[in-house]
Each structure stands twice: as structure tokens, then as C-alpha cells.
Amino acid sequence: MSTARTSATSRDGRIDAGSDRYARPLIALHWVIAIAIISMLCIGFYMVGLPRGLPFKSDLINFHKSLGITVFLLVLLRILVRLAYGRPPLPPMRTWQRAAASITQALLYVGMVGMPLTGYLGSSFNKYGTKFWGLALPQWGSDDKHLREIFFGIHGTIAWIMAALIVLHFLGAMKHQLIDRDGLLRRMWP
């Protein structure tokens, strides 16, 4: 790897011309959001299997909702930061790999926005609503089991798709790191 490409960002964190690394704020947001989303998926898959009426389950659901909204806000911030800082060019790769990377990344963003929105909307159509770290958020409707099931069904489907996309994203990064050895992982490594 050439040493000319090692100065990734300028003092203000912006990507230097010719850099192959993301700006520091994007790297930080990537890893915080990644850890939070993986945690959210684990909590979500765990809590749906718990029996109704457990006090612990309601606490877990409220934590899941608060963390989900926090992740949603961080994703919105990440989108704004990415628009401001840009992204480094991809290393040379086959056309199908470039397309797969772009599609996977676009779908991850759709999921990162869609999952919390459908969760919030599903919660808006029950008597409990959504509390964001204890603060009650507006409900968008009354207790409606049919609408709640639709939104939670979409929420659950997106969760499974996100889990698959995260695995695909991870495997792609490992392929680039261990097989191609093209330094792609270094772009986003802290």
C-alpha cells in the first residue's frame, strides 16, 4: 500500500483529495450505529419470544424503542455528515462488485430509516405509545390492532432483511480484507 494515501483526512476531518478513508465523523457514526443496530436486532429478536405480561418485557420494549429512535436520529445525522464530507472513491473492482456494494449500502440506509419509522408507527397505534427515554412522543392514531400489526409486520420483515444485509456487508468487507487485500476495510476502520 502506498504511503502517499495514508493521510486520510485534513485537520477539520474532511476527506483530503486522493484519500481512500472516510472522514473521522463518518467513521465514528458508522461504528456507533453499527453496534447499536446489532444490539437492537438482538434485543428485538429476543423480546418477541418472551411471554406477555412480564414486567421485564415492557422495560425491554421501552429501551428498544428509545434506542431505536436514538439510532434513527444518528442515521439522519450520518446522512447529513456524509453529504457534507463526501466519501472516498472505491478501489478498483469488478462492475458487479461495485453494483453489489452500492445496492447493499442503499438497502442498508433504507432499512436504517424504515425500521425505526415502522416501529414508531406501530407503537403509535396502541394504547402504550412510545416513550423516548421517558418522554412521551405523539401518537399518530388510536389503538388500532390492524394498523399496528401491519406496521410491526413490516418492522419485523425489515429486521430480518437488515440482519441479512449486515452479514452480507461484513462478508464483503472480509473478502476485501482477506482475499483481495485491497485495503477497503481501512477506509472505515477507526
Image: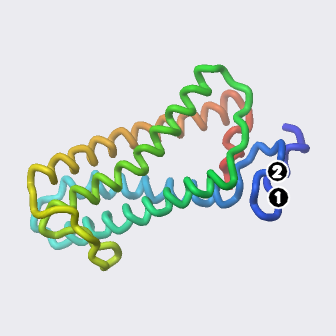
Kindly give the residue lying farthest to the front in the view shown. Answer: 140
Q: Which residue is mark 1?
A: 10
Left or right relative to 75: residue 40: left
Are there few (<14), some (14-19), or many (20+) residues within 10 Å of tag 2? some
Q: Which residue is mark 2?
A: 16
Q: Position of residue 105 (x, y in %)?
A: 52, 39
Residue at the outermost top position: 95
Say whether residue 10 is left or right of residue 68: right
Q: Residue at x 16, y 70 (%)?
A: 128
Residue 150: give x, y in percent of width and height. Answer: 17, 46
The reply to whether discs 2 and 1 touch (Cβ–Cβ < 8 Å) is yes
Q: Is residue 170 above or below residue 147?
A: above
Given residues 141 and 24, the one toward you in this image is 141
Q: Residue furthest right?
A: 4
Task: Look at the image and tell me in which quarter the C terminus lies.
Answer: bottom right
Q: Is residue 89 above or below residue 35?
A: above
The residue nearer to you, when weighing 44 against 121, is 121
Quadrant of res 72: bottom left
- Distance between the alpha carbons at the discs numbered 2 and 1: 6 Å
- Type of amino acid under label 1: Ser
Element under label 2?
Answer: loop
Q: Residue at x 50, y 35 (%)?
A: 104
How far across and how far down the image is residue 75, in percent? 49, 56
Colour approach in the figure: rainbow
Question: Where is residue 77 shown, x and y percent of the image?
Answer: 54, 61
> Who's the residue at 36% across and 48% down the image?
114
Q: Earlier in the sequence, mark 2 or mark 1?
A: 1
- Which residue is more in the foreground, 101 or 121? 121
The disc labelled 2 sits on which kind of residue?
Asp
In this rendering, the answer to whether 132 lies above or below 69 is: below
